[in-house]
Amino acid sequence: MFSMSKTEKLLAKLKNGTISAQELRTLLGQLGWILARQKGSHEQWLKNGKVITLATHSKDLKPYQIKQVSKALEE
């Protein structure tokens, strides 16, 4: 029987667009991204010179944010 790791489950939720802001933070941390800066509800995550900015005004992420993170993780 095949069992998915926590990271694989979060990547699947990201791909489906059903990931929450807290789950996305967990995923980025597991993938080696570092929370470099936070000002109010905006967070900047860094890895290998790449920057992801999340604006988490609520617990829900906007579709453009999910797309931005997906693209950054593919590169």
Image (cartoon, grey):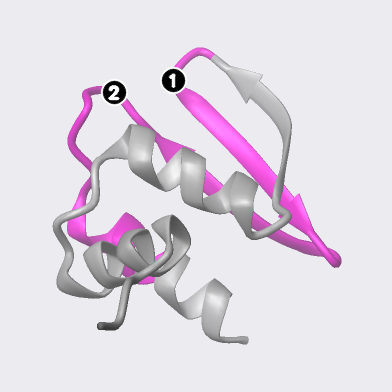
- Label 1: which secondary element: loop
Q: Report helix, strand or loop for mark 2.
A: loop
Q: On the image, which quarter does residue 38 sit in? A: top right
Q: Which mark is residue 57?
A: 2
Q: Quadrant of the N terminus?
A: bottom left
Locate residue 3 relative to residue 26 in the image: left or right.
left
Q: Is residue 71 left or right of residue 18?
A: right
Task: Residue under label 1, please give it.
Answer: 41
Q: Position of residue 23 (x, y in %)?
A: 35, 41
Q: Residue at x 36, y 32 (%)?
A: 22
Lower position in the chain sequence, tag 2 or tag 1: 1
Q: Which mark is residue 29?
A: none
The alpha-carbon separation of the residues under discs 2 and 1 comes to 6 Å
Q: Residue furthest right?
A: 48
Whether residue 69 sits left or right of residue 18 in the image: it is right
Residue at figure coordinates x 26%, y 75% from the top left = 15
Quadrant of the rendering where the C terminus is positioned: bottom right
31 versus 59 height, above or below: below
Q: Which residues are magenta?
A: 40-68
Toward the viewer: 10 or 38?
A: 10
